[in-house]
Structures are given as structure tokens and as C-alpha cells.
Image: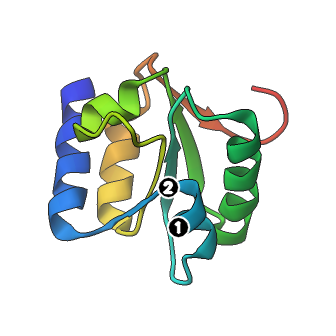
Amino acid sequence: MIEKVGAYLGFCLRAGKVVFGVDDIETYKKKIYLVIADGDLAENSFKRLLKANERFCATLMTTSAGLLGELLHKPQVKAVAIKDYNLSKAILEAAKDQTQFKFYSGGNN
């Protein structure tokens, strides 16, 4: 199933439906449906991502350390946002039972 998540992220990349990085996610003006943070993301950056995520009312998913960059074939990437509703829904469905992915619901995880 982890391969499915990678495939859906690849579709998002090819369709131009990805916002890369905490800075760009914070300043993005349109709707975002899913935010994905890597486990290696720094604590302060994660806090900034949480604030931005609250503004969009999107789902926040975290991955195990280094997995996001591996799935995107871009090891330097630590945070992305998905702009397409259907692709974000498909990613969530493929990731829901995988131990490498956690869903943030606020408070302590």
C-alpha cells in the first residue's frame, strides 16, 4: 500500500497539485485538502505548519523520518500540501492502515 501512496503523490506532482515547503504552504491563498509532514521536520517548522493547517481546515498527515522525500524522489522535501480533493482522498485511503503514516488531530500524538 505504501507504493500506492507514492503513486498518488506522483500523480499530484505531474498534475501540478503540490505546494512544497512550509514557507510556500503558509503563504498559499487557495484551498488545500491535505498537508503531509516528514518525521524529520524541525519542531518550529512543524508548529508553523500546524498554524497554516488550521487556516485551511485540512487533514495533517505525518510520515516516518525520511519517507516523504523517498516517496517523492526528492530527499530534501520535508513538507507538502495537496491541492486536489480527489487525490488527497485517495492518498488518505491508501495510508490509513499503514504504520508509517500518522494523522494529527491536535494535542499530543
Q: Residues within 10 Å of mark 1 (few under 14, many from 20)?
A: few
Near-viewer residue (94 or 100): 100
Rounded to the nearest angstrom, the CA distance separating label 2 from label 1 is: 6 Å
The residue labelled by disc 2 is 21
Is 93 placed left or right of 80 in the picture? Answer: left
Q: Residue at x 82, y 28 (%)?
A: 108
Residue projecting furthest to the top: 99
Is 66 placed left or right of 56 in the picture? Answer: left
Q: Residue at x 17, y 55 (%)?
A: 11
Q: Residue at x 40, y 21 (%)?
A: 98
The residue labelled by disc 1 is 24
Question: Which quadrant of the figure has residue 2?
Answer: top left
Residue projecting furthest to the right: 107
Quadrant (top left/top right/bottom left/bottom right) for the N terminus: top left
Secondary element at tag 1? helix
Q: Cβ–Cβ below 8 Å for labels 2 and 1?
A: yes
x, y percentage for residue 56? 63, 69
x, y percentage for residue 17? 30, 68
Q: Which mark is residue 44?
A: none
Question: Which quadrant of the figure has residue 97?
Answer: top left
> Does the image show residue 19?
yes
x, y percentage for residue 80? 45, 52
Residue projecting furthest to the bottom: 29
Amino acid bearing label 2: Gly
Q: Residue at x 66, y 59 (%)?
A: 53
Amino acid bearing label 1: Asp
> Does the image show residue 1?
no
**Is residue 70 positioned above or below 15 on the image?**
above
Near-viewer residue (37 or 8): 37
Secondary element at tag 2? loop
Q: Residues within 10 Å of mark 2 (few under 14, many from 20)?
A: some
